[in-house]
Image (cartoon, grey):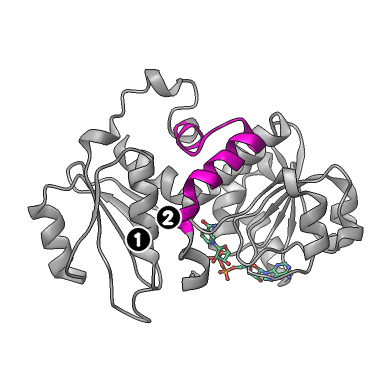
Amino acid sequence: MTRLTAEQVLDIPGKIKEFDRQLLKKTGCSLKELALDVVAPALTPAAVPLNPAACPVAIIPITAGAGTIKGFSEALCAVAAYLGFPAFITKVSDVAGLARAYQGNASIALMADDYLYAAINLKTRRVVGNDEATAKGYTAALGKMAGGIAGKEVLLIGLGPLGVAAAQALLQEGAGLIFYDLVREKEAALFKSCTGEEQQRITIGLSLEQALARTCLIYDASSGSAFIPAAWLPASAIVSAPGLPLGLDSMAAQKVADRLIHEPLQIGTAVMLFQALS
Ligand SMILES: NC(=O)c1ccc[n+]([C@@H]2O[C@H](COP(=O)([O-])OP(=O)(O)OC[C@H]3O[C@@H](n4cnc5c(N)ncnc54)[C@H](O)[C@@H]3O)[C@@H](O)[C@H]2O)c1
């Protein structure tokens, strides 16, 4: 898991409302609706029997490994509160923080170290990891922007843990996939781990330029920066990009501005919270 930086998270609390407005404009769904769509796709928000107001969320700072990231806990707290969860950051960290979460009667604990960012339902013991939640949230966002992805081909760039989770989510939605990773062996390895039926929907071994010429649906789960030039990007490209930093170069990002979802943690955290609650 690549660590977030303070610069990536510091302005999340102040900009979450605007982020949600943009998400609604691009996908037709608010952050809450998108998360609920992952958790309970057939239900409208009003009909979903999930009540965030009754489920306090404790955010526990963890100092292990490389330590806490400035603004990270505050960003998680802002996202949870925005979604209607009573949320608090424990005043103490690590084990003492977990104890405070229980003492404060929290329903869900959110915590992250250098390896795992997880939401843990302290009452039901359900554990939700960020990779899976982010993968599903961005798959839902791509589907909303594209009017569905079943039967369509998606270029999945970056096959680390997030990309592997994204492949599962995209295949589950019925998409065909082109795998692309800078480390080309990862394409064959992930292909081999898929079922025979899934393999029939997967293409590997194309260059990035060839892959971009074949589809306008792009899922960037890579850690690469600005390696996708505007000239290679189809005019009608739709891009779901959880990977940090953004793989599109600045001109490519401008080209798809209204059809690009890219942010560092709001979508993943929203899906984690509602999955943990469900
Ligand atoms: N937005 C979010 O909510 C969110 C959530 C989880 C992870 N992330 C970010 O997503 C990225 C991927 O996460 P991960 O844990 O899988 O990281 P990882 O570093 O384990 O994997 C990244 C993969 O991208 C590939 N890659 C790098 N540059 C590339 C390029 N130019 N072309 C093609 N492939 C390239 C690498 O070879 C690697 O396989 C990280 O940057 C992480 O910070 C974002």
Query: Residue 96 placed where, x, y %?
Result: 13, 68
Q: Which residue is drawn at 85% across and 59% down?
A: 206
Query: Residue 121 placed where, x, y %?
Result: 24, 46
SS label for mark 1: helix
Residue 149 visible in this rendered orientation of the protein: yes
234 to 44, vertically: above or below:
below
* Span shown in magenta: 12-36
The quarter in which the C terminus is drawn is: top left
50 to 251, vertically: above or below:
above
Q: Is residue 38 magenta?
A: no
127 to 247, vertically: above or below:
above
Question: Mark on residue 74?
Answer: 1
Ligand 1 resides in the quarter of the picture at: bottom right
- In the current view of this chain or complex, which residue is farthest to the top? 47
Q: Which amino acid does label 1 sit on?
A: Glu
Instruction: First in sequence, mark 2 or 1: give its number.
Output: 2
Q: Quadrant of residue 273?
A: top left
Is the stretch drawn in magenta largely helix, strand or loop?
helix
User: Is residue 134 shown left or right of residue 102?
Assistant: right
Q: Which residue is drawn at 69% across and 31% down?
A: 150
